[in-house]
Amino acid sequence: MNIAIVGAGAAGLFLAQQLSKNIAADIYVFEKTAKVATKLKASGGGRANILNENIVPDCYNQPAFIRTLLQKVDAKTIEHAFVQMGLKTVVDEENRVYPATLFAQTVVDVLLENMSPSVHIVVNTDIQKIQAKGNLWQLNNMETLFHKVIFASGSPAGMIRKNRQAYNAYLDSLQLDSKILQPSLSGFRIRQYPNILFGCRTRAIVSLYQNQQLIAKEKGEITFKEDGLSGIVVLNMSAYYNRLQDRQNCYLLLNFMYEDEDYDVERHLKTYKTLSGILHPKLNQLYRQKPFDVKNFRLDIEGVYDFEFAQVASGGIAVGEVDENFQLKRYKNLYAIGEMLDVDGICGGYNLFFAFASAYCVAKNIIDGNKNCQL
Ligand SMILES: Cc1cc2nc3c(=O)[nH]c(=O)nc-3n(C[C@H](O)[C@H](O)[C@H](O)COP(=O)(O)OP(=O)(O)OC[C@H]3O[C@@H](n4cnc5c(N)ncnc54)[C@H](O)[C@@H]3O)c2cc1C
């Protein structure tokens, strides 16, 4: 059997590893760039937060789809698969799982080392075309035909503009239902941005509102960039922002009283005549110029930063196009996994978990369908 995987990212490599250990097949992984797993290596600030031990379906844009997935494969399944490859992991206080080395490269190394020689990773090969040839599939004009093809070509998130053009265009001929791609887990561009705050890194309780209605609220560290706001908590807000039907009149309210959101700031001011002792120096400087409500500091959202600065894309192939094994309902033996599907989660290991879990399902489906092997 010949199996093709389009894309040597987290999902594609995990799938190749799982298949190669359990099935007698020639597995080709086609990668358009010169290197494999570029995004995986950059994940988690180079440490790769590979999953979260407590996957909450509501933290994804498709909670029902994830609930069904979790019945088949959960965080323990994926962690166990990595442990079996010899990867030692560590878990932090927020259930985020990392390689114990705290190096993303370690994850890539164990994946590659645990593949059998039946995996052929072919770099610098841009898949631009797929067509049926009888019961088999042809990619580009290759002579080799494939019994099964798995699309694992991710999204344009984290990429500069020139590399994003015609992203996943090889799928156009299949006419799959898909949702427009938007940068997600990205910072916000802010209207009438207070420039004086550029460089300020502080902690805050961040609430996302639309027309006075609370959409999401989280606490954490934020960073004021040149023209907007970033930090994990802000990135998460961008995911909730992208899930809104229309994104008019959205704004953030920041409460800088992170440790005690009900702290009596008025009383503090009366007692000490200054907020120097409770505010970041840059915020304090702004306050001195023009006093503001330190528990409700409003920033109007202009939009999210471009794909280049995004960790994932929201949108992609509609989940209604795939069955519970991630096989395309309309095309037998074609599958789609990972970020190219319209599934995105918040920060904390949710997106890599989905890449691995969807790959795991496909591997299990192909292996179960092949009577000689077991996963
Ligand atoms: C800076 C950054 C930090 C992140 N941190 C985390 C984190 O800590 N935890 C977490 O869970 N998630 C994190 N993410 C998100 C996570 O990395 C992605 O969701 C995940 O890597 C997606 O895996 P994938 O295999 O679906 O796609 P990708 O990793 O994007 O892989 C797709 C591959 O397909 C290749 N390809 C594309 N088109 C073609 C084609 N036509 N022919 C051949 N090859 C093609 C691409 O070059 C790429 O190598 C982060 C992302 C970024 C950018």
Image (spheres, grey):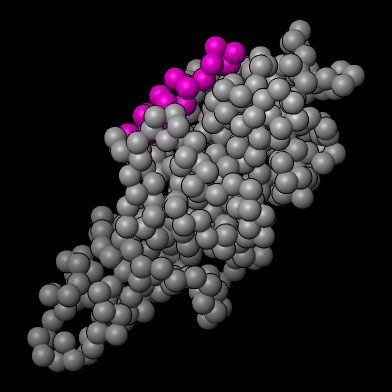
User: Which residue is pictured at 78% across the width and 21% down the height?
Assistant: 147
* Quadrant of the image occupied by residue 323: top right
Kindly indicate the quadrant of the structure image that contains residue 262.
bottom left
Q: Quadrant of the C terminus?
A: top right
Q: Position of residue 247 (x, y in %)?
A: 60, 65
| Residue 169 visible | no
Where residue 149 appears, as percent x and y from the top left, is 72, 26
In this rendered view, identify the residue nearer to me: 77 or 101.
Answer: 77
Q: Residue at x 83, y 32 (%)?
A: 332
Residue at image position (55%, 39%) is 356
- Specify the segment rendered in magenta: 103-124
Indicate whether 20 appears above or below 234.
Answer: above
Seen from the viewer's position, the closer of residues 125 and 366 is: 366
Q: Is residue 123 magenta?
A: yes
In this view, the residue in front, 47 or 31, is 47
Left or right of 268: which side holds 205? right
> Would you place residue 124 above or below residue 215 in this image?
above
Q: Is 118 displayed left or right of 287 in the figure?
A: right
Q: Quadrant of residue 86?
A: top left
Question: What residue do we see at 67% from left, 16% from top?
Answer: 25
